[in-house]
């Protein structure tokens, strides 16, 4: 900075760290719904797949754009809270419009899954699978004691093979 009268503007855009809680869906407001960003369509719009299974055009407000978007970066697969425009009249052939209200981080996703009710199976990417079960319906269980037994038996086999090597044969 420096210069004459430069200290007036030197800390103009100082960001204060935010230590608040995550915003959850308001139970009394039926127009607030959880969604996932499918793709960014450009400008201030994105396509969001909502938990009710409907794909909507989402308007990204100025709060989530520009200089202050550090913790609100939108990419495909990010969970968001949207407000449906129930007052807006739309053409039957077009997608309905909604507004972006909150952007959830990866840590917020796990908190939402455990603490709140919602149709979370809809909010997945196409290639993303549920890691709790196998597609065939068989649950696999991994035990560290079984893995240790396998490692010990292979180490014993290697030691036995090394013991049978005769130095004179080399």
Image (cartoon, rainbow, N blue to C red):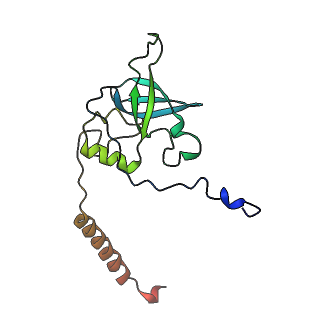
Q: Is residue 153 left or right of residue 55?
A: left
Residue 8, position as x, y percentages in the image: 66, 58
Quarter of the image for residue 154 reads bottom left
Q: Is residue 66 above or below residue 153?
A: above
Residue, x 23% and y 64% (percent of image)? 146
Q: Residue at x 38, y 23 (%)?
A: 54
| Residue name at image x 25 percent, y 41 percent | 116
The quarter holding residue 134 reads top left
Disc tally is 0
| Quadrant into which the N terminus falls | bottom right
Residue 126 at least partly seen: no
Coordinates of residue 130 in the picture (x, y in percent): 32, 42
Q: Residue furthest top?
A: 92
Query: Vertical placement of 117 versus 161: above or below?
Result: above
Residue at 53% of width from left, 49% of height from top? 70
In the rendered view, would you say 97 is above or below 104? above
Could you tell whether 87 is left or right of 24 in the image? right
Quadrant of the rendered image containing residue 137 = top left
Residue nearest the observer in this picture, 21 or 92: 21
In depth, the one of 142 and 39 nearer the eye is 39
Tell me residue 62's x, y (percent): 54, 36
Q: Is residue 154 among the parts visible in the rendering?
A: yes
Observer-nearest of 124 and 101: 101
Location of residue 75 in the rendering, given as x and y in whole percent from the top left corner: 51, 40
Considering every residue shown, the one lying at the far right of the view is 3
């Amino acid at each position: 900075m420096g210069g004459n009268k430069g200290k007036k503007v030197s800390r103009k855009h100082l960001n204060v760290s935010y230590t608040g809680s995550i915003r959850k869906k308001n139970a009394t407001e039926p127009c607030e719904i959880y969604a996932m960003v499918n793709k960014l369509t450009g400008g201030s719009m994105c396509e969001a797949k909502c938990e009710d299974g409907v794909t909507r055009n989402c308007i990204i407000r100025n709060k989530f754009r520009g200089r202050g978007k550090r913790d609100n970066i939108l990419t495909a697969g990010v969970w968001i809270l949207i407000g449906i425009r129930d007052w807006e009249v739309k053409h039957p052939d077009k997608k309905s419009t909604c507004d972006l209200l909150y952007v959830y981080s990866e840590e917020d996703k796990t908190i939402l899954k455990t603490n709140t009710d919602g149709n979370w199976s809809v909010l997945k990417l196409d290639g993303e699978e549920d890691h709790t079960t196998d597609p065939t319906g068989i649950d696999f269980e991994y035990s560290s004691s079984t893995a240790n037994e396998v490692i010990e038996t292979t180490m014993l086999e290697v030691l036995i093979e090394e013991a049978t090597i005769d130095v004179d044969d080399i």
